[in-house]
Image (cartoon, helix red, strand yellow):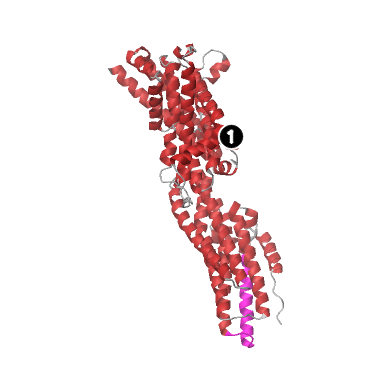
Amino acid sequence: MTTYFFNLVSLLGGLALFLFGMGTMGKALERQAGGKLQTILAKMSSTVFRGFLLGMAVTAVIQSSSATTVMVVGFVNSGIMTLQQAVGVIMGSNIGTTVTAWLLSLIGLEGNSFIVSLFKPTTLAPMIGTVGIVLYMFTKSEKKQGVGTIMLGFLTLMIGMDIMGDSMAFLENEAWFAQLMISFSNPLIGILFGALLTAIIQSSSASIGILQGLCVTGVVTYGSAIPIILGQNIGTCITALVGSIGANRNARRTAIVHLLFNVVGVVIFVIVFYGLSLVVDWKFLNDSASAWGIAVIHTCFNVCATFILMPLNGLLVKLAYLFIPQKETPQKTELLDPRLLATPAVACQRAHEIAAQMATDSGEAIRLAIGLTKEFDEKIMLQVRELENRTDHYEDALGTYLVQLSAKNLSISDNRLLNTILYTLSDIERIGDHALSIAKAAQEMRDKQINFSDQAKAELEVLEQAVTGAVNSAVAAYQSFDLDQAIEVEPQEQVVDSLVREIKARHVRRLRDGLCSVEYGFVLEDLLTACKRTADHCSNIAVEILQVSEGKLEAHEYLYALKSGALHESAAFSERFASYKAKYSFPEEA
């Protein structure tokens, strides 16, 4: 009884280390890959075959088909990816996840040669762990520390596997365990057990690892291992199915396609393999399974299933539509899907995409509103209102999402990205507000039949060009955090300020000379205020990109140092200011 107790404790401890190591390694790999995962999956999976290759590559990198599939469900729910694109990625993820089994098969290496001994886990894992701890503790580079975390995760994973193997060795002489393994030779029982085990721990890689660990007992035969492996492929679908709850119909269909792919693959394999067993004597089924053999079977099944079902991808989609029929009402896409929060780097990238779209909409609103001051159009006015409402919606959605994301374990670069978005959201939204203010001023000009003098029109034209230039530079900088574009904004903002002051001075002189009325001055003031504040918000956005996101000076300190000549960029700033001052110059007063 005592032996059983201590072996059970060791088994549970080994399993804990194994799962922790796998989780640590997977999360570290995700962080290293960063937001590129979204770009790769969403923008480069144009065909089923390309999606298959990308799904395989991404899953091999992050070591989790469940994480890839949940990510894909989130992409489909957000409208980033179509259902057809998702099919190929799902197929590829099933093969990519087999990499873990091959890594774990190292526990079965036998031989005493130097090369074999070098790659045995008892030698390889400590070597990798030693390098990992050096990178993790004694380097300052985030990337090197991330690589060190991956290595330490691998070490922990292998130690867990070794402890599990040692703690389960006693089962070799246990009759009840031998009987249990024999019962799994029944395909139905074995498949159900494999599916249940994987559904509980929500990782096919982990359940395959446990099966490989059991191989040390010598009691696990290929006859009992094959059904369990088949079941594990079905059980891994539970993560995506649970993740699709509450998603739109296409996202739920994506999870159904994942399930159908694995279920149909298992059914075909069972019919063919066990059907042939009626006429073919599969002698290897009675042999003791090895960790290497488990990896081979796992890979062969997924490769064969993909080879058979890839040409039938359209049929899988049609079956998914049978389970979840199409409705006449258009389905709603989730702007920022909370499922992506499970992969913080991807969630950060998605948040930046939405913020960049928000900035683009604000810039378009300004362009349209300025056009209204020349020729008013009710349809354009409605477009400006719609764009302003959309930026308000984006701000609300992003604010909530970023607060949730800030609680996640983010890399330094992702944390800077998140902070930059948070600090600039209100500036982007206010640009949309000022666009509406300009549009309303244009509407007032139309309603009151206010018509500025030719001189005033020419001055406003110059100012509006300068404001548009500043907005365009800020939006371009924000879309890709382009520092070259960002440094162009502040000198343009300074030019806008000087133009506003000059227009006010000229307007006062025209009032004094009786060439303009006070009523015109109220509308002019509204236009000037909106233009000046728009440029101010563009400056705030650019400064945030240049400084705060890099962890340097606070925004106001940076601007003071820049204008006072305390920064080395000050000379270049003066040159840019002079260039824009010459570009946006008023005609001489009559």
Which sits in the foreground, 456 or 559?
456
| Quadrant, the C terminus | bottom right
Q: Residue at x 68, y 59 (%)?
A: 572
Question: Magenta segment range?
Answer: 493-517
| Quadrant, the N terminus | top left
> Does the image show residue 505?
yes
Q: Residues within 10 Å of mark 1 (few under 14, many from 20)?
A: some
Label 1 is placed on what type of residue? Leu
Residue annotated with mark 1: 53
Residue 165 placement: quadrant: top left
Residue 462 placement: quadrant: bottom right
Q: Position of residue 577 (x, y in %)?
A: 67, 65
Q: Measured along the vertical axis of the image, is residue 249 above or below residue 189? A: below
Q: Position of residue 382 (x, y in %)?
A: 54, 67
Q: Position of residue 566 (x, y in %)?
A: 62, 60
Q: Is residue 514 magenta?
A: yes
Judge from the rendering whether residue 192 lies leftward or rightward of residue 305; answer left or right. left
Q: Is residue 540 magenta?
A: no
